[in-house]
Image: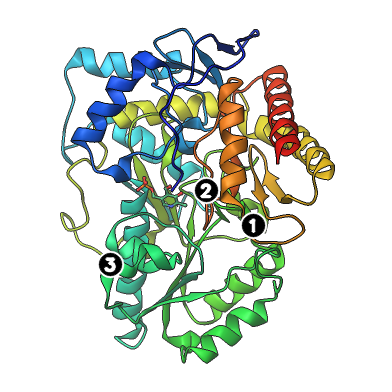
Amino acid sequence: MAVYDLTPVEVPPVETKYRRIRTKLPVPQSLPIFESLGRSEPRSMAGQPPIVWDKAEDFIVSDPWGNRWIDWSSGVLITNAGHGREEIRAALREVIDRGLLASYVFVHERRARLTEMLRALSPDPQKYRVFLMSTGSEATENCIKLSKTYGLQKHGPHKKYFVTFDYAFHGRTMGAQLAGGIEKQKQWMVDRDPSFVQVPFPDGYKNEDTSFDLFLKTLREKGVSPQHIAGVMTETYQGGGPDFLPAEYAQKLERLCREHDIVMCYDEVQAGFGRTGKMFGYEHYGVRPDLIACGKGISSSLPISAVIGREDIMGLYPPGSMTSTHSGSPLPVAAAIASLEIIQKEGLVERAARLGEILMAELRRIQQKHPQVLGCVQGKGLVAGIQVVKPGTKTPDPELALKINIACLQKGLLMFAPVGASGECIKIAPPLSIPEDALRESIGVLEEAVDEVLGRV
Ligand SMILES: Cc1ncc(COP(=O)(O)O)c(C=O)c1O
């Protein structure tokens, strides 16, 4: 976990159209807030750059002391339509003014509207259904449960395996972590459910073997036969790269699923709603998932998630038995409708694809200046990552990644703490609404920061 020093340091002032830094960082007056949280919260909640968010508008985040950052975090890939969009605020105000703040699964009209909108985005609107929840972890848990239920009910108890990938992240609840592929996050369980099985992810950098044969071979080695697999789930891209599957691999995986009636799940919690330059990232692969887990960017704001899935699988549970207290809660639903409308009306999906071309070309140019330590640059649409490594190797260098992250922060460019298995990946994920000149300005800031930090090492 990244550790940011809380000692205020003098930094050169910054004043541009979009960025402003005019205090020491962290801001001395902010320290009592960090100290208070240090007393009240578990330390697991620390670990992000030490600024205090006061206002967030579109692609700019401000603190209470007049500093402003161009945002490359989108929170954590939440605000695809931009932070605090007026259309979303207006929709929320309308619901608040009616006083309809909670409804359990009693019906309200907007729930019908949102589920219709999401169904319309599915691979086959006539044959897909939508189940609303609150968090991404709930959505991936639901994919696990539905896949295993389908295997059990349709084929019997031997069809029980749930296959996922090494280094996968599907959330922090127990099922999501069993399906996850990050070993150190799972140690607390001691005993593992042996029906959860991981295979290597074909990222092409850390694992150079991107053939689907490796998938089959690993399952054989683990004694898992395809006819005993209930479900397979992959993130559309693994966050720490971001690492995408080769399209051919995804298609072969789909064929295997069809051949053995395996439920094919895509975790679109990060990738969904335009982030990769497609409405859903799986569209890059030319496949048709049976279950799609959504979260984060669905509302660009309040907590809401969904599983969009094949009606025969979604219909396995009778009325009243697959619900959640806040399924379709009125405020998150209103926010999601407004956010989706913005994404569609403003063509943010196409925009992410177009701006992504600029971003990737520029990142590759920066990488070529420092190929020894900027080991790998990847991305699609408006999500990208730079893996920082020890010179000339593929060994992660989380300390150097953190230095670059802090240098950017001091210049008015905000990212969340570096990600990846060791914290080596500088992740870039601005709101999809970022103007081209702000994107270019922020890439310039990254370049300046990288040049300065690498000049010092
Ligand atoms: C791919 C993916 N799946 C699931 C989750 C879990 O979502 P949540 O934190 O909303 O439970 C995340 C969150 O980072 C994610 O990136």
Amino acid type, mark 1: Phe
Q: Earlier in the sequence, mark 1 or mark 2?
A: 1
Left or right position of 437 against 341: right
Q: Earlier in the sequence, mark 3 or mark 1?
A: 3
Which SS class for mark 3? Answer: helix
The one nearer the camera, 277 or 27, is 27
> Given this view, does label 3 or label 1 mark the residue nearer the observer?
3
Which residue is found at the position 34% from the left and 30% from the top? 302
**C-beta proximity under 8 Å, tags 1 and 2:** no
Which SS class for mark 2? Answer: loop
Alpha carbon distance from label 1 to label 2: 16 Å
Amino acid type, mark 2: Val
Crowding near the residue tagged with mark 1, few <14, some 14–19, many ≥20 C-alpha atoms within 10 Å? many
**C-beta proximity under 8 Å, tags 2 and 3:** no
Q: Earlier in the sequence, mark 2 or mark 3?
A: 3
Which residue is found at the position 21% from the left and 40% from the top? 326
- Does residue 146 show up? no
**Residue 184 pos. (x, y %):** 40, 65
Cβ of mark 1 under 8 A from ligand 1:
no
- Which quadrant of the figure has residue 405? top right
**Residue 419 pos. (x, y %):** 52, 48
**Residue 63 pos. (x, y %):** 43, 15
Q: Which numbered marker is on residue 188? A: 3
Q: Quadrant of the C terminus?
A: top right
The one nearer the camera, 87 or 196, is 196
Cβ of mark 2 under 8 A from ligand 1:
no
Which SS class for mark 1? Answer: strand
Q: How many marks?
A: 3
The one nearer the camera, 167 or 32, is 32
The one nearer the camera, 306 or 40, is 40
Q: Label 1, on which residue?
A: 244
